[in-house]
Image: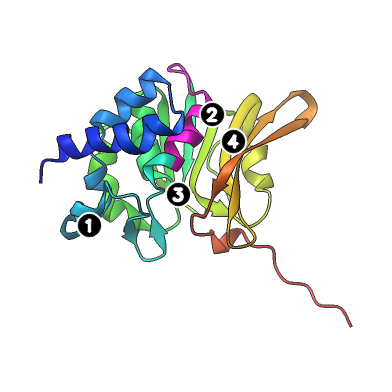
Amino acid sequence: MDFAAARKVMVDSQVRVNDVTDRALQAALMVVPRERFVPAERAFVAYAETAAQIADGRKLMPARDIAKLLQAADPRSDERALCLAAPYAAAVLARMGLAVTAQEADVAVFDVAGAALADEGVTTVVAPLTAPQGDGWDLIVSEMATPVRPDAWLAALRDGGRLVVVERSGPVGKAVLYVKGQDDALSRKVLFDSAPPVLAELAPTPTFAL
């Protein structure tokens, strides 16, 4: 399979036609080898308009959705980004010149994507996704959905930092952009509909009342 040709078709048919106009983002999507973020025997599905599986319970966000999320995040080449359950986004941001850390709760994701992330200069961390590593991040991104507002992630942003994620409590979620202001003030903007799998570990603990 000609993966370079597949990347061009992906950008032309899934990204540009969905109002993703950022030239630097398009250029990064054209060169990051998406096929290296799925098991080798499944490489042929990496450029389909589907959520290709990375490992058990983890999937790549479709190119259209991650491109729209990253464009809304307005990444800048001198920034620091934390990618939570977002290995492909991490590689794209690194190719755009950001200093990127990819955090996963399950090392199985890095068993698949770790070599590709290392080639892009991405730092990898295995730790619970409920506890983002470090703080003062300019940008936080997730390719998975959260069932509630991810307050711990928002707390890890610097003033002026941005978080892009899908919030999903039903069949279809909403991609949102948070911007953190002074004194922990937050603005929230709904971007588009999306339905990635939900990170179960971020679900609130059920409470029962008699």
Please provide percent x and percent y for residue 34.
26, 42
Position of the C terminus by quadrant: bottom right
Direction right: furthest residue: 210
Q: Which residue is mark 1?
A: 39
Q: Which residue is mark 3?
A: 85
Direction bottom: furthest residue: 210
Q: Is residue 91 above or below residue 107?
A: above
The image quarter containing residue 51 is bottom left
Pick the front one: 49 or 137: 49
Q: Comparing marks 2 and 3, which lies closer to the viewer?
A: 2
Direction left: furthest residue: 1
Is 75 within the magenta? Answer: yes
**Residue at left offset 34%, top offset 25%:** 26
Q: Earlier in the sequence, mark 4 or mark 3?
A: 3
Q: How is the rendered protein coloured?
A: rainbow
Q: Earlier in the sequence, mark 1 or mark 3?
A: 1
Q: CA distance from mark 4 to mark 2?
A: 7 Å
Q: Earlier in the sequence, mark 2 or mark 1?
A: 1
Left or right: 194 in relation to 11: right
Q: Report the disc number at residue 73.
A: 2
Q: Amino acid at mark 4?
A: Leu
Q: Amino acid at mark 2?
A: Ala
Please provide percent x and percent y for residue 50.
36, 54
Q: Can residue 130 be seen from the camera position used here?
A: no
Q: CA distance from mark 4 to mark 3?
A: 13 Å
The secondary structure that most of the magenta stretch takes on is helix
Pick the front one: 155 or 41: 41
